[in-house]
């Protein structure tokens, strides 16, 4: 495994919640109403809206992720809080059964991300980061929210902005490699002994609910629409040799690994469409992951000089909760105890699937959990288009 990954600590996790917290029971009801309205408008009133509502509601209950697995999800959109279609900014379904197009959705994304970066970096923020990596797959606006906050705070000569876009749920792993490379570069350019503290911040801004499309009624889409939520989190990376202080608590990176599984290109996609971003998800995804995950973890541990068999029973696992079945499958294949996956289940239950922002939420939960002792190995896994399987090994310190 690349040596530059061996001396980095992740710390100072800070999350911001979306404007609106909606229970899963309520959002299922809202989804059913939206699907019925969309179907009625698509058929120019020839379809009985109440009858379609009676048909789609049980399908959402059948295929959607229920409240026993997700209690609530967050969203930046006021639209999800009411059913007055004519007053909605994106989902005025009486005019457009798919909702507004990409341009208006990106305008809302831009506004929301500006708000979040103001929260991450208020006027009285301490020192600016040397590098700021903006991670997202749900919005594309230039200049980005990261660039704008640097300009507004007059950090132009202090902070370099980089973007890690469009990789989906696993994007945190390439972002870790970027952060490690920036830290290594600072050491090489300044000299290991004389280098001042170099800080790399990673900021995730995901507005997954912005891409809901009520005109798509397939079981696959009902699964997707019931899982994803908005989420925002920021954290910092330092060299272990140059932490903010001797008392710094965090997660030390031992290694990162990424693979694209063979013969899996069509298993998962995330593409732009006229109305927003559209996801496809094959039924083969759990099997493809299941067939590869043990070999993948063994390879990742071997590259970091660890024996997975010796570490497994005492490790905790940060598994990206693409859905409850993914966590269940990983637990079964690796023969894990419930406590080892507790943080992943908690984050899914409390917040839903927030794409790339999800794993950092899980890491923060593990870091703050006093029952997880220092020196515990944290095995992290995430999956995405490619089909990509990505992981990291972290040590709680």
Image: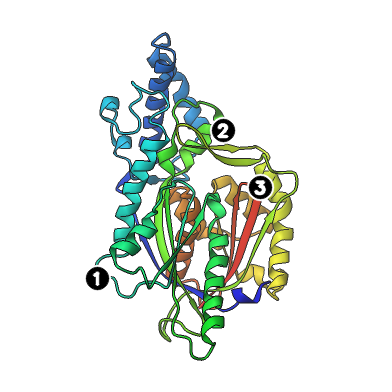
- Contact, CB < 8 Å: mark 1 with mark 3? no
Q: Please give left or right for residue 136 compared with residue 158 in the image.
A: right
Furthest-bottom residue in this view: 193
Q: Which residue: 31% across, 65% down?
A: 121
- Contact, CB < 8 Å: mark 1 with mark 2? no
Q: Which residue: 38% across, 73% down?
A: 158
Residue 64 image position (x, y, % from top left): 50, 35
The quadrant in which the N terminus is found is bottom right
Residue 95 image position (x, y, % from top left): 34, 21
Residue 264 image position (x, y, % from top left): 71, 44
Q: Label 1: which residue?
A: 124
Q: Which residue: 69% across, 74% down?
A: 306
Q: Residues within 10 Å of mark 2 (few under 14, many from 20)?
A: some
| Mark with earlier residue (1, 3) | 1
- Contact, CB < 8 Å: mark 3 with mark 2? no
| Mark with earlier residue (3, 2) | 2
SS for dot 1? loop
Q: Label 3: which residue?
A: 387
Quadrant location of residue 390? Answer: bottom right
Q: CA distance from mark 1 to mark 3?
A: 43 Å
> Between tags 1 and 2, which lies in front?
1
Residue 44 image position (x, y, % from top left): 40, 11
Q: Which residue: 45% across, 78% down?
A: 198
Q: Residues within 10 Å of mark 1 (few under 14, many from 20)?
A: few
Q: CA distance from mark 1 to mark 2?
A: 46 Å
**Is residue 260 shown above or below 154?**
above
**Is residue 268 shown above or below 310?**
above
Q: Label 2: which residue?
A: 220
């Amino acid at each position: 495994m690349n040596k530059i990954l061996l001396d980095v600590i992740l710390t100072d996790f800070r999350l911001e919640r979306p404007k609106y917290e909606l229970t899963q029971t309520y959002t299922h009801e809202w989804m059913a109403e939206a699907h019925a309205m969309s179907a009625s408008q698509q058929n120019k009133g020839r379809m009985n809206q109440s009858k379609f509502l009676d048909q789609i509601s049980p399908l959402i209950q059948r295929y959607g992720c229920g409240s026993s697995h997700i209690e609530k999800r967050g969203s930046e959109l006021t639209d999800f809080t009411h059913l007055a279609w004519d007053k909605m900014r994106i989902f005025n379904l009486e005019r457009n059964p798919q909702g507004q197009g990409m341009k208006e959705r990106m305008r809302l994304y831009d506004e929301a991300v500006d708000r979040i970066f103001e929260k991450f970096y208020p006027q009285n923020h301490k020192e600016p980061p040397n590098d700021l990596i903006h991670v997202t797959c749900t919005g594309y606006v230039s200049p980005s929210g990261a660039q704008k906050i640097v300009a507004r705070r007059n950090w132009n000569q202090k902070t370099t902005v980089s973007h890690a876009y469009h990789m989906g749920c696993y994007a945190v792993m390439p972002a870790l490699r970027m952060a490690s490379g920036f830290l290594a570069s600072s050491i090489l350019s300044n000299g290991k002994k004389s280098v001042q503290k170099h800080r790399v911040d990673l900021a995730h801004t995901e507005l997954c609910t912005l891409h809901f499309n009520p005109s798509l009624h397939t079981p696959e889409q009902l699964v997707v629409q019931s899982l994803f939520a908005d989420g925002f989190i920021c954290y910092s990376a330092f060299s272990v040799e140059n932490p903010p202080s001797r008392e710094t608590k965090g997660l030390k990176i031992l290694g990162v690994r990424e693979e694209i599984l063979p013969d899996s290109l069509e298993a998962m996609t995330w593409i732009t469409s006229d109305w927003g971003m559209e996801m496809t998800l094959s039924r083969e995804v759990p099997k493809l992951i299941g067939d590869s995950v043990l070999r993948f973890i063994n390879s990742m541990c071997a590259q970091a000089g660890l024996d997975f068999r010796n570490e497994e029973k005492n490790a905790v696992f940060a598994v990206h909760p693409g859905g409850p079945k993914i966590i269940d499958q990983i637990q079964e294949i690796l023969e894990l105890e419930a406590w080892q996956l507790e943080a992943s289940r908690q984050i899914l239950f409390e917040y839903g699937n927030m794409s790339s922002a999800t794993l950092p939420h899980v890491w923060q939960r593990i870091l703050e959990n006093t029952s997880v002792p220092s020196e515990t190995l944290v095995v992290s896994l995430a999956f995405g288009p490619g089909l990509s399987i990505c992981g990291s090994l972290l040590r709680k310190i």
